[in-house]
Amino acid sequence: MAPFYKYGFFGDEMSLVLAFVLGTGFGFFLERAGFGSARKLAAQFYLYDMSVFKVMFTAIVTAMLGVTYLGWLGWLDLSLVYLVPTHLVPQIVGGLVLGVGFVVGGYCPGTSVASLATGRIDGFVYAFGIGAGTLVYAEVFPWLKGFVNSNDMGQVTLPEVFDLPWGVVVFAVVMIAVAGFSAATFIERRIGDRS
Amino acid sequence: MKLPALTLNQKLAIVAVALGTLALFSVPHRGPVVTLDTRELALIVEKEVDHVTPSELAGWIVQGRSDYRLIDLRAESEYAAYHIPTAENVTVAALPDFPFLRNEKIVLYSDGGIHAAQAWMLMQAQGYRAVYTVLGGLEGWKDDVLYPALPAQASGAERARFERAVALSRFFGGEPRAEGGAVAPVPTELPKLAAPVPSGAGSPVAPRKKKKEGC
């Protein structure tokens, strides 16, 4: 029965070891997808290389289908899976801030560490910036606290918000992904041809 | 007619669509039906590891611990009249639908021990593992914490324990009995609800510590 940690199959120490192994694997595949390079990532925003969109949406669909089927088979208790509580407006603002940083810096937090690991100087600078930004955020957090904690919707999922059966949401997300991939390929060809 | 050769991406897309379509009929497991390990439960009951004594609980409240939820299973009116500080009111009927987290430590109490024990079993059946009951319920709380009594011909250890109990009793607005020797009956009047609570920040419930999870 999963999640293994909640069912006590391993403790805190082992979970840190596993986090290291999984994180290394994550970084490896980011690098393999070419995301250790800021050029590749920035290309997403100029729409001539949609790899970021495709890789991330593929990850979402793969994980969603995996979780759905494991839950269906009864191997995973979905009520035990931790969900980050939704604070709609603060999280949209946070997403925009992250997006601006993504465009300007050419990395997102995960990919910057992957690029740092391969020895890129811009990756190092970006990762250093994350550290400095985190410190500043921690210092000003008391002033932001009210806003950050506003709009609390609790731990919600799309089936609950839209009041739809679980399977319908899964099916819809897969369809959106497939349509998105086709559209992305189409856009790549158009923009790629022009440039 | 020959079908055009598919790229790997197109094949993967077909697999995803097939899985997504099949998922339309999925009913993800959320654990309402469980198999109880009756031997394990019997051992828990026999070894009494599911008990929290009233004095232990009182100690936790004094320390301001927030790693557990104290649940008062009695009716709302009884809860309004008196409850153990920091307790939340959830009646037994409301318990199955109350949104507890699976990994929360839940401490139940009722008047005596029976409702709490039955509720404990309900919670086990719903897959909540870290559920405890207050030994003796609210009666136990009154006897041990609010109105502790010093037995006649008390030994030194008993005396020392009573000293500590007196301090706890005063803290919760109770009244220790029989410092002179004679055991007085338990007062029927319960302390006012404004029992002192350590957090001091105005709220009777200490702020819950944020779970370190997620990314």
Image (spheres, rainbow, N blue to C red):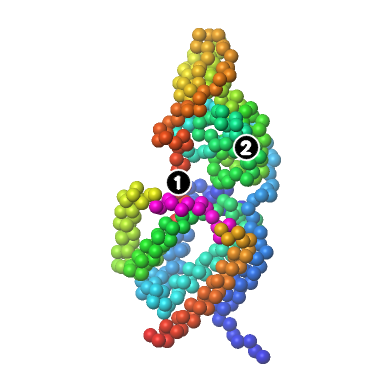
Label 1 CA crowd tier, 10 Å (few <14, some 14–19, many 20+):
few
Instruction: Report helix, strand or loop for mark 2.
Output: loop
Residue B130's place in the image compared with B148, above or below, is: below
Image coordinates for residue B103, horizontal then vertical, percent: 55, 45
Q: Residue at x 58, y 82 (%)?
A: B6
Residue A72 seen in the figure? no
Which one is in front, B57 or B2?
B57
Residue A106's place in the image compared with B54, above or below, is: below
Quadrant of the image containing the C terminus of chain B: bottom left
- Does the segment drawn in magenta span residue B124? no
Residue A162 seen in the figure? yes
Residue A103 figure quarter = bottom left
- The residue indicated by pointer 1 is B210
Image coordinates for residue A138, horizontal then vertical, percent: 34, 51
The amino acid type found where label 2 is placed reads Thr
Quadrant of the image containing the N terminus of chain B: bottom right
Residue B7 figure quarter = bottom right
Which one is in front, B92 or B78?
B78
- The residue indicated by pointer 2 is B91
